[in-house]
Image (tube, grey):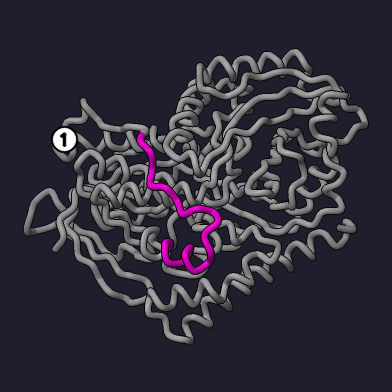
């Protein structure tokens, strides 16, 4: 029986951030993830390390200020996985925001950021904006606002956080499920836990003091299941999430180097064109889902693909002739709002149910703030004093250099980064998924290298390659169906 202070459920950036901070402060931690690390919304973000300029309109000044502080800290922690990017906000005839209001918003964004070492905002005339980004539509272009923000490799950054947690003693268990938890008769105040590995069915037995539910869009369901185990007979908790699906399209590079913040003509929503790894990420949508989301609600629809393709082509006419390479889809764990997903706050909430703490909501960029709040809620339950909480913005483990070959990437991913399946490496430990062929040519070498280290049979190796091929073809078919009527 392994004794542990915390069992953290969920291996997205929120759970990993909690594991990192707890282990750095000497707590014993076991993190349990049913799939791969960052395999949900944490690897399907807009890849922006940002304060959230658009949240200023809703008066969320504290959220923006905190996130901007974290933007600077995370950039220092992972310079190889983050980069500053200059964003343009085109001003056109009939724009929702007049120039004076945009200028005021950008000035406030700079003020909230403080001295964060990024270039301050500026304004450009139409000719200047067109010179900076010739791909912009000229019709009705009046000028642009410019501001600075960060872009990150979200999945690989999450894996770096996991590596930091493990280096400080956290036990990271992927492809594993919690199958039972009950109050321990042997040691009052603790709980006997059984974990089961998905593939081998091997079981791990723990004795845990406290549980943290960081399962994102599934946290309502996890909370219900856990409390039924931990407090049998008690009334069921009320749901607190209003999740939403966000979809991004991955294009060949559509701009020279800038990001774009754009307002959609059809519905007035804000979306982005984000330069990343030589590509352009276009998104996002906001479609409400159930809590927990059904499997079909986790994937992009034809309508969402068409919406994004149509809106980006309006601002960047060249996008109409460019074919997207891939689709990303993730379900955000937004707190329930009366007005629906579009009005939902990006604030977070820690809910205390005795032996279970649930963290819901929040932004990728503020994962360290969420971790601190969870530990402050957990400390009294564990008899810990956190007045001197240690949360330094020290460098995270350095990723393998981008020039490494597929075999080296595979070896490092298995031995250092918790990878267990082919798509873990192609999609979340490298940029191979962004290649023109979506990593298909590299897949055999990656699968072969993984097979040697993980002991796969020839049949398992073939199955892994076939699963990735199916994924790539499925996305290509979705893009074909969505864009055929638009002449794309």
Asked if residue 409 shows in the view, the reply is yes
Residue at figure coordinates x 70%, y 45% from the top left: 282
Residue 233 visible somewhere in the drawing: no
Which residue sits furthest bottom? 458
Q: Residue at x 68, y 31 (%)?
A: 87
Q: Is residue 235 left or right of residue 253?
A: left
In the image: residue 87, left or right of residue 201:
right
Q: Position of residue 476 (x, y in %)?
A: 72, 66
**In this view, 464 is above or below 379:** below
Q: Main secondary structure of the magenta part?
A: loop
Residue 32 position by quadrant:
bottom left
Locate the N terminus and report the quarter of the image it occupies: bottom left
Residue depicted at 43% across the width and 30% down the height: 73
374 inside magenta stretch: no
Q: Is residue 403 magenta?
A: yes
Residue under pointer 1: 384
The local crowd at label 1, few if under 14, some if 14 to 19, many if 20 or more residues have their Cα within 10 Å, is: few
Quadrant location, the C terminus: bottom right
In the rendering, at what x and y percent does residue 177 appear?
Answer: 34, 64
Which image quadrant for residue 452? bottom left
Question: Which residues fall within the magenta stretch?
Answer: 394-413
Quick one: which residue is furthest to the right in this view?
Answer: 139
Residue 6 location, x and y as percent? 24, 48
Question: Is disc 1 placed on a helix, strand or loop?
Answer: loop
Residue found at the far left of this picture: 186
Q: Residue at x 79, y 43 (%)?
A: 312
């Amino acid at each position: 029986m392994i004794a542990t202070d915390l069992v953290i459920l969920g291996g997205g950036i929120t759970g990993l951030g909690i594991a990192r901070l707890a282990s750095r402060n000497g707590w014993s931690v076991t993190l349990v993830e049913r799939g791969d690390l960052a395999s949900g919304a944490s690897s399907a973000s807009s890849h922006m390390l940002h304060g959230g300029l658009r949240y200023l309109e809703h008066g969320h000044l504290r959220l923006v200020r905190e996130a901007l502080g974290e933007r600077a800290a995370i950039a220092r922690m992972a310079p190889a996985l983050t980069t500053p990017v200059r964003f343009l906000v085109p001003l056109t005839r009939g724009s929702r925001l007049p120039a004076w209001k945009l200028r005021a918003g950008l000035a406030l964004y700079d003020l909230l950021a403080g001295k964060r070492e990024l270039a301050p905002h500026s304004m450009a005339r139409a000719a200047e904006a067109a010179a900076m980004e010739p791909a912009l539509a000229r019709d009705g272009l009046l000028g642009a606002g410019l501001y600075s923000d960060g872009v990150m490799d979200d999945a690989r950054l999450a894996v770096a956080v996991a590596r930091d947690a493990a280096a400080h003693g956290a036990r990271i268990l992927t492809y594993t499920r919690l199958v039972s938890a009950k109050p321990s008769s042997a040691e009052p105040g603790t709980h006997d836990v059984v974990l089961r590995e998905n593939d081998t069915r091997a079981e791990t037995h723990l004795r845990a003091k406290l549980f943290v539910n960081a399962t994102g869009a599934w946290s309502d369901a996890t909370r219900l299941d856990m409390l039924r185990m931990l407090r049998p007979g008690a009334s069921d908790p009320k749901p607190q999430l209003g999740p939403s699906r966000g979809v991004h399209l991955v294009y060949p590079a559509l701009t020279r180097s800038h990001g774009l913040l754009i307002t959609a003509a059809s519905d007035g929503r804000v979306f982005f064109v984000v330069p990343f790894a030589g590509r352009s990420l276009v998104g996002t949508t906001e479609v409400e889902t159930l809590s927990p989301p059904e499997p079909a609600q986790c994937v992009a629809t034809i309508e969402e693909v068409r919406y994004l393709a149509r809106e980006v082509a309006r601002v960047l006419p060249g996008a109409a002739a460019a074919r997207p390479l891939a689709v990303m889809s993730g379900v955000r764990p937004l707190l329930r709002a009366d007005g629906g997903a579009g009005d939902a706050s990006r604030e977070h909430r820690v809910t205390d149910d005795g032996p279970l703490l649930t963290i819901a909501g929040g932004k990728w960029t503020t994962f360290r703030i969420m971790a601190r709040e969870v530990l402050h809620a957990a400390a009294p339950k564990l008899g810990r004093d956190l007045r001197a909480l240690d949360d330094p913005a020290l460098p995270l483990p350095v990723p393998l250099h981008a020039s490494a070959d597929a075999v080296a990437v595979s070896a490092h991913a298995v031995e250092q980064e918790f990878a267990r399946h082919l798509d873990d490496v192609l999609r979340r430990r490298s940029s191979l998924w962004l290649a023109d062929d979506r990593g298909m040519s590299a897949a055999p070498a990656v699968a072969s290298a993984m097979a040697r280290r993980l002991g796969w049979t020839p049949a398992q190796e073939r199955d892994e390659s076939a699963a990735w091929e199916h994924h790539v073809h499925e996305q290509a078919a979705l893009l074909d169906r969505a864009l055929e009527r638009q002449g794309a």
